[in-house]
Amino acid sequence: MPRSPQSSESDTVGSSAESAAAPLQEAIGSVLGRIPSGLFVVTWRAAEADRFMLASWVMQAGFSPPAITVAVGSSRDLLTAIATGTPFVVNILGESQRPLLARFGRPPVAGEDPFAGIEIVRGSSGAPAIAAATGWLECRGIAQAPSGDHTIVVAEVTDGRTGSAEPPLVHLRRNGLRY
């Protein structure tokens, strides 16, 4: 690469390092994408409205008390709700519920009810739960830890119900470095 009068040797070295790192990033992304996860609709109530987000990074984190972790994008409204003590529900989707991904995998549209046509039950906190889900867990956040562009929420499970008997929806990504 020809150097301009303003470029320096470190600019050239930096570019070489970046291009050398690209195959490593691709390899890392390919392997991360092979880590299976479920697909979950996280729901909560805020300002008298039912809210939601699609999540894939949910894992059990404790037996006594029962706990889970949820990785939440750092700009998501759910983090504000959790910080104010708002309980939330993790709905575990089943294999037949793949069509719900299109509905819950995009930001809400003003005036549109994302739960229209879906039977909802309420947890003890009033947060919505999808009745046809494989199961749902009502939770309250007890700790948070930053993790790059996400925040890991540790949550105590305060209630839960089993739903349909179908297997949960399992997800593999092509590249674990992006959605």
Image: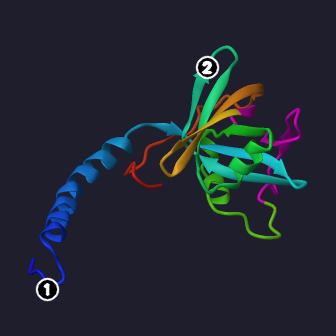
Q: Residues within 10 Å of mark 1 (few under 14, many from 20)?
A: few
Quarter of the image with the N terminus in it? bottom left
Q: Label 2 amino acid? A: Gly
Tell me which residue sits at (71%, 49%) in the image. Answer: 78
Residue 1, placed above or below residue 19: below
Q: Label 1 amino acid? A: Pro
Q: Which mark is residue 5?
A: 1
User: How far from the left and from the top, in percent, is residue 98?
Assistant: 60, 49
- Residue that protrudes farthest toward the left in the picture: 2
Tell me which residue sits at (83%, 70%) in the image. Answer: 111
Nearer-the-camera pick, 49 or 17: 17
Residue 75, placed above or below residue 152: below
Q: Residues within 10 Å of mark 2 (few under 14, many from 20)?
A: some
User: How far from the left and from the top, in percent, is residue 90?
Assistant: 70, 38
Q: Is residue 124 magenta?
A: yes
Instruction: Tell me where the magenta segment starts and ends, as one range.
Output: 114-141
Q: Which residue is mark 2?
A: 62
Q: Secondary structure at mark 1?
A: loop
Q: Is residue 17 magenta?
A: no
Residue 37, placed above or below residue 6: above
Q: Which mark is residue 107?
A: none
User: How far from the left and from the top, in percent, is residue 75?
Assistant: 62, 57
User: How far from the left and from the top, in percent, is residue 46?
Assistant: 84, 52
Q: Is residue 116 left or right of residue 133?
A: right
